[in-house]
Amino acid sequence: MKNHTTLAFIGSLLILIGTAIGAGMLALPLISAQAGFTHAIILLTAIWILMTITGLLVLEVNLAFKARRNNFDSMAKGTLGKPGQIIAWLACLLLLYALTAAYISGNASLVDELTQHVLHHPISNWVNAILFTIVFGGAVFWSTRTVDLLNRWLMSVKGITLIIMLILLMPHVHWTQLMSQPGHTHYLWAAAPIFLTAFGFHTSIPSLSNYLGPQVKKLKWIVIIGATVPFVIYILWLVCSLGIIPMLGSQSFHMIEQQGNSVGGFVLTLNNIVHSHWVSVGVNTFSNIAMTTSFLGVTLGLFDFLADALKRSNDRFGRFQTALITFVPPLIFALLYPKGFIMALGYAAVCVAVLEVIMPALMAYQLRRHKKLKSPYRVFGGTPLLVIVEICGVLLIIAQFWNSIH
């Protein structure tokens, strides 16, 4: 029994880490290169602290509600009333549906590689997207434990791939280049919203709370470790990428920007400088698996959010109804309007700032004043900390809109 509990703890931790570390990690160097390594690390540290605190605030509010009636919908309604519930609905659905559609589109390429390798014949992209959704969406439909077991295996492969990739890249880092980058602080406005989304694991917390039960100490450590592991990995990734690719030249961040600032161009430039086939394989493999683990974490959060909001039962028929609502809309949108969601993802950071920064602070403030709702856990810092969090959330939204204008 104790062994099972330990494995459930580790599995829950891996779900949280897998949700945070997605293919978006590859974009971090692109968005922060102009700001310089030192400024990027300072910003990354600030975002890590902010998102760890807001993750704990979500946990504080979550533990005041009954199991399976404790998602963002119920938390917002119970603490902020109908207006809070509506905002939670809009922000959560827009963010999670957009991410789900993006991961379905991106992971269709992974299924394409697998089907070509097995069947030696290309299959239409829409078939690959449907196959991917059925297989991995089926895991979410079946149970959180199924997602846990599948995610453990994927995270193991992703972890090994990431370690090998970093080991291969580290010898090529030019430390003088890394530390001498002048950087421009105004580029931090563009980097801040993207860094924020790199720590977006909060929607998975209610699902893990339902899975483990109200084990306050374990859930608290899952949030803290789940935010810290991505933070360390992101630092190592920025060291490798910004320390290898120069700002100017034929193979540089300047040329990548001229070619559209794409992740594909970044991977190609990195491979051309390092001259390693295995680095290319490692980055591509990591990217595919990262999108899959993020898909599992994001859709698990979306599934439980919809089940709670629509009051669907937890039996097979009820879960099947929830699965249809969870996966069919983003699948259709991803197939018919793939470019439309690229634009929507540009504003995903606004949804993250509202749902995972501003609302947790507001909900915690109202919860602490509530006469009936009580949580067995309270985040340190009192009201002053909540005010600081609110200000940070507003600044992040301003940063995103400033980026869209410029």
Image (cartoon, rainbow, N blue to C red):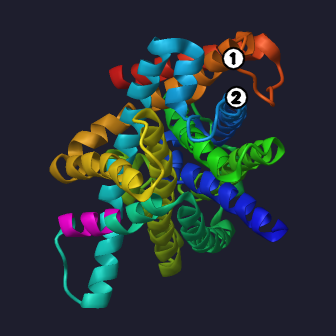
In the image, 321 versus 158, the foreground residue is: 321
Q: Is residue 94 visible?
A: yes
The magenta stretch spans residue 95 = no
In the image, 3 versus 132, the foreground residue is: 3
The magenta stretch spans residue 129 = yes
Q: Position of residue 109 (x, y in %)?
A: 31, 68
The reply, left or right, for residue 69 in relation to residue 248 is: right
Does residue 161 sit above or below 39 in this rendering? below
Q: Is residue 24 visible?
A: no
In the image, 249 versus 108, the foreground residue is: 108
Where, by quadrant of the figure, is residue 69 drawn? top right
| First along the sequence among labels 2 and 1 | 2
Give the residue displayed 60% in from the left and 39% down from the top.
36
Give the residue displayed 39% in from the left and 35% down from the top.
310
Kind of residue at disc 1: Leu
Q: Quadrant of the C terminus?
A: top left
In the image, the segment drawn in magenta is 126-133
Q: Position of residue 19 (x, y in %)?
A: 55, 51
Q: Dot 2 lies on which element?
A: loop
Residue where numbered disc 2 is placed? 64
Give the residue displayed 32% in from the left and 52% down from the top.
327
Residue where numbered disc 1 is placed? 367
The answer to whether mark 2 and mark 1 are in CB contact below 8 A is yes
Q: Position of residue 282 (x, y in %)?
A: 52, 73
Kind of residue at disc 2: Ala
Q: Position of residue 205 (x, y in %)?
A: 62, 42
The reply, left or right, for residue 177 in relation to residue 337 is: right
Query: How far is the residue under mark 2 from the one under mark 1?
Result: 8 Å
Does residue 79 sit above or below 403 in this rendering? above
- Number of residues whose C-alpha sits closer than 10 Å to that of mark 1, classed few (under 14), some (14–19) or many (20 or more): many
Give the residue displayed 26% in from the left and 52% down from the top.
331
